[in-house]
Image: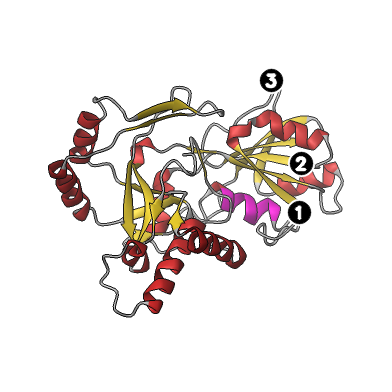
């Protein structure tokens, strides 16, 4: 995507590793979305969209992959969203054996993107195990389709927020409440302004951009979830000031992926939303720290780009 590139291994991951938390999660799933995807996988008898997994980068794995991608690819095309996809097939059993051995020595994999897809694939595998008590563990439904990227390759964009109203407050009242937990500074430059560091936010209100710097004491720096910018925003503005207790279900809030740019936030406010917030992106290290602690990220914390096209790879379950 532009100047960015990421190189991953397309492979099958074990549903037992998922169930045993060798594959670590950081998000909750919604039952309705999980059931919908479970039906899709079961009826198609295949995984058609890969789960993004990540792991701490390993030099030995990188060396094998870098050597292999120096070869002629099987496919090389650019999709209509200007994302270039280049595909190589590793068909050397010795290389596959070395990679398998190296990954056996990696303690954990982490779901970066695809919690609903992975949960539904595991549910289908469990369902088929129940229907086949004599299963050996070698059946294809014991695995799900994944693309495994080293952490250094993944790029998380900002995941921004827009809110329909100020919860009964006027502009000055709202700014006063925000100023209790943030240093509020109007942005004097031209055009949109992007947060430059963690715990710095940018707000668009009534045609004006503002810089919001979280004050000391407005969050717990020792807690890997509480110190996330999405948590600071929720606990200090969205919940107590704007009355959005559950951003998963409240229809007064919407989420805008960073791929759409800050101009999209301006447009949404100009077309009727009351206020927009631009966030500093969550990092891959944040994600792994939270998963290692067995904790859950707030909803809409990460937006990954570039994304693989569904259907490029298909894993048949039988």
Q: Is residue 72 left or right of residue 275?
A: left
Q: Residue furthest top?
A: 190
Query: Which of the two residues, 200 or 130, is positioned nearer the viewer here?
Result: 130
Circle 1: element type: loop
Task: Specify few, some or many for label 3: CA neighbours under 10 Å numbering under 14, 14-19, or 20 or more.
Answer: few
Query: Which of the two residues, 95 or 27, is positioned nearer the viewer here?
Result: 95
Task: Specify few, some or many for label 1: CA neighbours under 10 Å numbering under 14, 14-19, or 20 or more.
Answer: many
Q: Residue furthest left?
A: 94
Circle 3: element type: loop
In the image, what residue occupies the spot 34% across and 35% down? Answer: 7
The answer to which of marks 3 and 2 sits earlier in the sequence is 3
In the image, what residue occupies the spot 44% across and 40% down? Answer: 312
The answer to which of marks 3 and 1 sits earlier in the sequence is 3
Marker disc for residue 189: 3
Query: Which of the two residues, 87 or 132, is positioned nearer the viewer here?
Result: 132
Q: Is residue 295 left or right of residue 299?
A: left
234 in magenta: yes
Q: Which residues fall within the magenta stretch?
A: 230-238
Marker disc for residue 224: none
In space, the residues marked 3 and 2 are separated at their CA atoms by 19 Å
In the image, what residue occupies the spot 51% across and 29% down? Answer: 79
Q: Are marks 2 and 1 in contact (CB under 8 Å)?
A: yes
Which residue is under mark 2?
275
Residue 100 in picture, x, y percent from top left: 20, 50
Which residue is under mark 1?
242
The answer to which of marks 2 and 1 sits earlier in the sequence is 1
């Amino acid at each position: 995507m532009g100047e960015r590139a990421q190189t991953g291994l397309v492979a099958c991951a074990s549903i037992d590793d998922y169930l045993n938390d060798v594959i670590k999660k950081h998000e909750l799933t919604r039952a309705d979305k999980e059931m919908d995807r479970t039906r899709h996988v079961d009826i198609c008898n295949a995984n058609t969209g890969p789960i993004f997994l990540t792991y701490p980068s390993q030099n030995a794995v990188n060396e094998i992959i870098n050597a292999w991608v120096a070869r002629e690819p099987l496919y090389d095309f650019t999709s209509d969203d200007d994302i270039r996809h280049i595909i190589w097939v590793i068909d050397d059993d010795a290389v596959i054996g070395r990679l398998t051995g190296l990954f056996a020595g990696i303690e954990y994999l982490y779901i970066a993107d695809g919690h609903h897809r992975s949960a539904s694939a595991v549910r289908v595998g469990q369902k088929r195990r129940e229907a086949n008590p004599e299963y050996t563990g070698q059946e294809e439904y014991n695995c799900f389709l994944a693309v495994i990227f080293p952490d250094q390759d993944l790029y998380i964009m900002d995941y921004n927020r827009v809110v329909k109203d100020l919860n009964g407050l006027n502009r000055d009242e709202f700014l006063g409440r925000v100023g209790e937990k943030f240093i509020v500074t109007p942005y004097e430059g031209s055009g949109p302004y992007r947060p430059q560091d963690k715990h710095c936010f940018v707000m668009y209100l009534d045609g004006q951009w503002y810089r919001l710097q979280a004050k000391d004491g407005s969050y717990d720096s020792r807690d890997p979830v509480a110190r996330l910018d999405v948590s600071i925003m929720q606990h200090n503005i969205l919940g107590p000031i704007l009355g959005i207790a559950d951003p998963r279900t409240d229809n007064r809030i919407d989420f805008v992926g960073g791929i759409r740019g800050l101009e999209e936030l301006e447009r949404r406010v100009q077309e009727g939303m009351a206020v927009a917030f631009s966030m500093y992106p969550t990092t891959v290290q944040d994600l792994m720290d939270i998963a290692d602690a067995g904790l859950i990220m707030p909803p809409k914390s990460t937006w990954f780009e570039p994304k693989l096209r569904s259907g490029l790879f298909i894993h048949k379950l039988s």
